[in-house]
């Protein structure tokens, strides 16, 4: 690793959105990543809508601003404003539920049409603990499957991986329950974000738009009441 | 997933226009059970921002009479124009209102912490269109000086006139205090122009400056109302940074505020269904039984709907035009350290335009020019939102305004118009919104700067839903949710 002395590593924030059918485990993945926690049979997602978590890479720090769906996916009511501007997306399906992969493919297509051109997309098959795979169930030593028996997997690794490769997506199988592969997903995304699309980056191309828009943004926190009382800038 | 019909809802809100959405935001920490639906498959209703595809089906809906506050919608693409981007690269705002810094809307967005998700951009200069003196010349745009410093520096105004203007700017900031009130109260209901002429010796040109800053649609704003809006403009100046008085939400104006308000509602647990409206209902029952277009039959304690009672007391003609040029000259920062503005306003005073038949424009026309920084069009283009009061000639007048504008901003060659969406928007209603446990929002104001009166019915609806639990001082006062506060130090 380079000897960078005492200089702090550059830090940039990245908007990351979650997409996927209801109940595939999107909120659980975030909870695992941010709080290293898991809640069985919890209420349908409410409350969590925006969380941040840092990801330390050797040469820089990425601060994820994670946008959860707030449940708006349940009746197909997620609007483009949610994923527009995102630099990264986690498209999640439940690998025990084939229809959820169909839905995931729909979201990938939607992102390719609507989101920023350079967006990093990770396809994530969740609930690996419900399969017979060593890796997924190994985490807490429980036997696989809800009933303790059998393999609930309905989407093969091959099928999803082939699709992900075709579309140029990162691909992982995870378990929010055991924590298997969860950090890895976020680290892989952080690594895949091109340096030039980071908000702190300067220079031509994609970075330009981001950097400039920060300068233009009007901050409502910065009300200058004293000034304004005088009425005008004189 | 809970079943819709198993829940006894506290309120069903139908429509996701700004007011309905702000209501959802206001209820987002109340623990009330909220079902929020919209027959459209996008957020925003009459305040939506549309892609070109959506605009096409919207026009069809307007023509089919399905959009009560709109009529006479039409899309045209000028012959031979090239360079229009793909349909989703556009976000054409049906409510491109600018928001003055001193607006209760911004106060509420801040106190409710909803503002964090909106990107606001500065509204820069206001210009006045001056027709060409003779056919060999180009029409011009004159920038209105709107601070005292600006007035002081400008060379466009003769020194004597400057004095009157300076005196007025000083007066208006304090016009409600005691010695000043004597000056204007006798003229309160008379046109502001007369007052300016009599008390400040302003000539027609200076009067036009002031009327433009007031954004008065008929140009005949009363002294009382005019002083209030001019004061708002001047006292907004500098509030959020140097050089600008108003701001604009990126990506489509009020539509954006509607969307983030709905999101806040969802985060609070409200259930959202787009593409779903009310099919039938049994009134007079408690709870109210509502059949949704999805087939679900649900029960709710109260119901909030969108008005469809446009009386057309005020009707504006609109023309939204996509132009194949960034028109950079309009978006220069107006003060040191000021952000690059993304919106400029150009006024065509009454009489400065004429129809092909030679009839002069009866009312002012206004153009809000949006740069691609608004996210409403691709780079290298701009979107013009043109408004004038509807008359039998208003559409011709707006077309004329478009041509004249393009002529004034072009160097050798006028920029090309790539796309036009025209329509008429109605407002006005006499009906009272609340009856028992049903509340109907009336069609809101079409003013060019956001009018705070839009917010009052939202609070009334909130009170109806909250009943005895409504505490006025707590309205829209929320703390940041976990994880959100850090956002600031980015
Ligand atoms: N077995 C198992 N259950 C999970 C996993 N992730 C989430 N769940 C459960 O699936 C349900 C839906 O999870 P949630 O995170 O709310 O899904 P979301 O709707 O996509 O946000 C909850 O009951 C979770 O406990 C996982 O990795 N394994
Ligand atoms: Mg969730």
Image: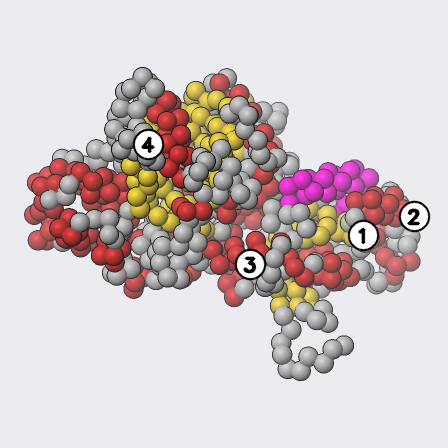
x, y percent for residue A150:
92, 48
Q: Nearer the viewer, residue A218 or B267?
A: A218
**Viewer-nearest of discs 1 and 4:** 4
Cα distance, mark 1 to mark 4? 65 Å
**Viewer-nearest of discs 3 and 1:** 3
x, y percent for residue B11:
49, 37
**Viewer-nearest of discs 2 and 4:** 4
Q: Residue at x 88, y 59 (%)?
A: A135
- Picture layout, residue B188 above or below residue B68: below
Q: Which residue is mark 4?
A: B136
What span is in magenta?
A92-115
Disc 1: which chain? Answer: A
Within the magenta stretch, is there residue A93?
A: yes
> Marks 3 and 1: CB-CB under 8 Å?
no
Question: Secondary structure under badge 1?
Answer: strand
Disc 4: which chain? Answer: B
Residue B209 visible in the displayed image: yes
Q: Residues within 10 Å of mark 3 (few under 14, many from 20)?
A: some
Q: Which residue is mark 2?
A: A150
Q: Residue at x 38, y 23 (%)?
A: B395
Q: Which residue is mark 1?
A: A171
Residue B21 visible in the displayed image: no
Question: In the shown orientation, is residue A230 left or right of residue B111?
Answer: left
Cα distance, mark 2 to mark 3? 52 Å
Disc 2: which chain? Answer: A
- Picture layout, residue B21 above or below residue A208: above
**Nearer the N terminus, badge 3 or badge 1?**
1
Taking the view exactly as shown, the residue that stands out farthest to the front is B136
């Amino acid at each position: 690793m380079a000897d960078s002395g005492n200089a702090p590593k550059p830090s940039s924030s990245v908007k990351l959105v979650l997409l996927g059918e209801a109940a595939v485990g999107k909120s659980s993945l975030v909870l695992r990543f941010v709080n290293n926690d898991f809640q069985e049979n919890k209420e349908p997602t409410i409350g969590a809508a925006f969380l941040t978590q840092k990801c330390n890479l050797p040469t820089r720090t990425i601060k994820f601003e994670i946008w959860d769906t707030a449940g708006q996916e349940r009746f197909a009511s997620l609007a483009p404003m949610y994923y527009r501007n995102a630099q990264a997306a986690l498209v999640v399906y439940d690998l025990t539920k084939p229809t959820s992969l169909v839905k995931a493919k729909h979201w990938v297509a939607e992102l390719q049409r609507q989101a920023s051109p350079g967006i990093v997309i990770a396809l994530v098959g969740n609930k690996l603990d419900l399969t017979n795979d060593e890796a997924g169930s190994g985490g807490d030593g429980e036997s696989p499957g809800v009933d303790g028996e059998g393999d609930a997997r309905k989407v093969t690794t091959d099928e999803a991986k082939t699709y992900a490769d075709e579309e140029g997506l990162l691909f992982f199988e995870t378990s929010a329950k055991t924590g298997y592969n969860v950090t890895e997903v976020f680290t892989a995304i952080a690594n895949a974000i091109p340096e030039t699309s980071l908000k702190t980056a300067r220079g031509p191309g994609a970075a330009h738009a981001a950097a400039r828009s920060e300068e233009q943004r009007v901050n409502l926190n910065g009300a200058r009441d004293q000034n304004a009382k005088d009425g005008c800038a004189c | 997933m809970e079943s819709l019909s198993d829940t006894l809802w506290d309120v069903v809100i139908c429509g996701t226009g700004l007011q309905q959405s702000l209501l959802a935001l206001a209820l987002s920490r109340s623990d009330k059970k909220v079902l929020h639906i919209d027959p459209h498959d996008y957020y925003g209703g009459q305040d939506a921002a549309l892609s070109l595809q959506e605009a096409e089906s919207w026009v069809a809906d307007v023509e089919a009479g399905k959009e009560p506050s709109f009529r006479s919608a039409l899309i045209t693409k000028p012959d031979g124009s090239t360079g229009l981007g793909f349909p989703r690269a556009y976000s054409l705002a049906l409510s491109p209102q600018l928001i003055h810094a001193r607006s209760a809307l911004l106060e509420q967005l801040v106190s409710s912490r909803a503002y964090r998700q909106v990107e606001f951009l500065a509204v820069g200069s206001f210009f006045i269109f001056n027709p060409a003196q003779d056919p060999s010349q180009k029409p011009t745009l004159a920038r209105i000086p709107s601070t005292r410093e600006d007035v002081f520096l400008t060379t466009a105004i003769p020194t004597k006139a400057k004095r009157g203007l300076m005196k007025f700017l000083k007066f208006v900031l304090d016009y409600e205090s005691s010695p000043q009130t004597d000056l204007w109260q006798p003229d309160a209901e008379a046109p502001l122009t007369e007052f300016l002429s009599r008390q400040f010796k302003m000539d027609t040109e200076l009067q036009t400056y002031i009327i433009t800053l007031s954004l008065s649609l008929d140009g005949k704003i009363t002294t009382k109302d005019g002083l209030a809006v001019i004061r708002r403009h001047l006292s907004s100046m500098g509030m959020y940074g140097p050089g600008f008085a108003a701001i604009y939400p990126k990506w489509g104006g009020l539509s954006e505020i509607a969307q983030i308000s709905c999101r806040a509602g969802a985060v609070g647990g409200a259930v959202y269904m787009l593409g779903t409206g009310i099919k039938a209902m049994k009134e007079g029952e408690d709870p109210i039984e509502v059949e949704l277009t999805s087939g679900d039959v649900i029960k709710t304690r109260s119901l909030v709907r969108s008005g469809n009672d446009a009386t057309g007391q005020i009707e504006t003609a609109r023309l939204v035009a996509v132009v194949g040029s960034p028109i950079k000259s309009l978006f220069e920062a107006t003060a040191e350290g000021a952000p690059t503005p993304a919106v400029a306003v150009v006024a065509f005073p009454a009489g400065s335009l004429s129809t092909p038949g030679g009839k002069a424009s009866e009312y002012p026309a206004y153009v809000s020019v949006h740069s691609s920084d608004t996210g409403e069009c691709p780079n290298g283009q701009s979107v013009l939102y043109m408004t004038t009061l509807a008359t039998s000639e208003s559409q011709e007048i707006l077309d004329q305004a478009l041509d004249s504008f393009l002529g004034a901003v072009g160097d050798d060659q006028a920029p090309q118009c790539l796309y036009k969406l025209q329509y008429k928007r109605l407002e006005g209603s006499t009906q009272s919104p609340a009856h028992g446990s049903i509340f109907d929002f009336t069609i809101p104001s079409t003013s060019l700067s956001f009018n705070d009166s839009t917010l009052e019915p939202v609070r009334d609806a909130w009170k109806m839903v909250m009943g005895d639990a409504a505490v006025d001082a707590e309205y829209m006062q929320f703390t940041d949710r976990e994880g959100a506060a850090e956002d600031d130090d980015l």
